[in-house]
């Protein structure tokens, strides 16, 4: 185990964080900083971080010296950083003495419980695990949940909304209005039937129709962008009516 002086800075921080392991997203750097006993311990921490997040993302700022630890602690470093920790964002893990502390945000309660369970299993009673994980649902997930896999309906071959399409946009207008000041991209898609050029034009016209409707419901036109993708990004087969219906859709994307 680690001596009284401990491995005081063996922290991982992902995101913009002053401690060791900060991550805000898929390509954000993973910063290692703090004190470790020697180069072999340092190599163990760095190797585990690279295995989890990729060599190109890990920034090693660890400092050697000033603390002591047993070989057992070196072996424990890897297992105390379970793979599920990759699901934590804006996070920080501190390994100090016999205490493992993890902070950050997770996208669901299920993920929170998984990370905690994995850490407790890894600790195996030899370490005390503290956690302050907050469930934060990503904004795009909230938008997708409001849409709930439903399709904005139009009259066949046109950009005229049906009554059902207008009712769905009434719901989406309320959902998007919660993100005050944020911008969105409205992306139109068609199925694969017909000429590609015509489908591109139709998908753009439908995206513009959605924008006009949302603006009529109080959303700012400046915060709404449109794009027509035509048949180029299908999510189902165009060989069945059900598949074609799924491909004829409007996406609502939060612009980061």
Image (cartoon, rainbow, N blue to C red):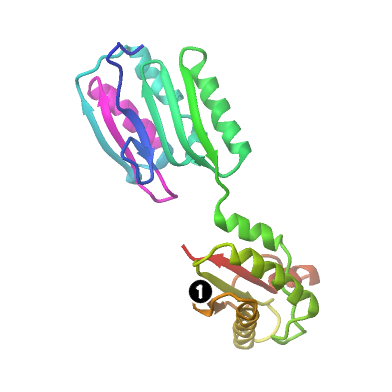
**The magenta segment:** 23-51
Along the viewing direction, whichever of 25 and 234 lies nearer the viewer: 25
State left or right for residue 150 relative to residue 202.
right
Residue drawn where x is 53% and y is 65% of the image:
180
Vertical relation: 226 (above or below) 177: below
Report the residue marked by disc 1.
223
Residue 30 drawn at (x, y percent): 35, 41
> Dot 1, crowdedness within 10 Å: few (<14), some or many (≥20)?
some
Q: Is residue 103 left or right of residue 143?
A: left
Which is more toward the observer, 14 or 43? 14
**Where does residue 221 sit, x and y in percent of width and height?**
53, 79
Write down the quadrant of residue 163 in the picture. bottom right
Q: On the rendered structure, is 73 left or right of 136?
A: left
Q: Where on the picture, by quarter, is residue 160?
A: bottom right
Residue at image position (38%, 18%) is: 75
Name the residue at 79% across, 68% down: 242
Magenta span has 96?
A: no
In percent of width and height, residue 114 lies at: 59, 32
Quadrant for the N terminus in the image: top left
Residue 224 relative to residue 81: left or right: right
Residue found at the far left of this picture: 65
181 versus 65 height, above or below: below
In the image, residue 147 above or below residue 93: below
Q: Position of residue 129 (x, y in %)?
A: 48, 21
Residue 4 lies in what quarter of the image?
A: top left
Badge 1 element: helix
């Amino acid at each position: 185990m680690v001596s009284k002086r401990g491995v005081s800075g063996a922290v991982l921080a992902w995101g913009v964080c002053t401690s060791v392991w900060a991550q805000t997203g898929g390509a954000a750097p993973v910063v290692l900083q703090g004190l470790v006993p020697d180069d072999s311990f340092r190599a163990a921490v760095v190797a585990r971080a690279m295995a989890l997040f990729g060599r190109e993302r890990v920034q090693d700022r660890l400092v050697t010296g000033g603390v002591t630890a047993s070989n057992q602690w070196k072996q424990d470093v890897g297992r105390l950083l379970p793979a599920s920790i990759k699901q934590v964002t804006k996070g920080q893990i501190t390994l100090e003495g016999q205490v493992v502390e993890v902070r950050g945000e997770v996208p669901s309660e299920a993920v929170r419980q998984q990370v905690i369970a994995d850490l407790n299993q890894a600790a195996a009673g030899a370490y005390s695990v503290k956690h302050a994980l907050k469930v934060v649902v990503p904004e795009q997930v909230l938008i997708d949940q409001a849409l709930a896999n439903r399709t904005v309906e139009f009259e066949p071959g046109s950009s005229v909304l049906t009554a059902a399409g207008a009712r769905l946009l009434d719901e989406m207008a309320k959902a998007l209005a919660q993100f005050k000041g944020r911008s969105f991209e409205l992306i139109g898609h068609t199925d694969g039937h017909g000429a590609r050029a015509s489908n591109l034009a139709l998908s753009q016209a439908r995206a513009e129709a959605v924008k006009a409707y949302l603006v009529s419901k109080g959303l700012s036109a400046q915060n709404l962008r449109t794009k027509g993708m035509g048949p180029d990004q299908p999510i189902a087969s165009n060989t069945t009516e059900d598949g074609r219906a799924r491909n004829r859709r409007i996406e609502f994307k939060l612009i980061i």
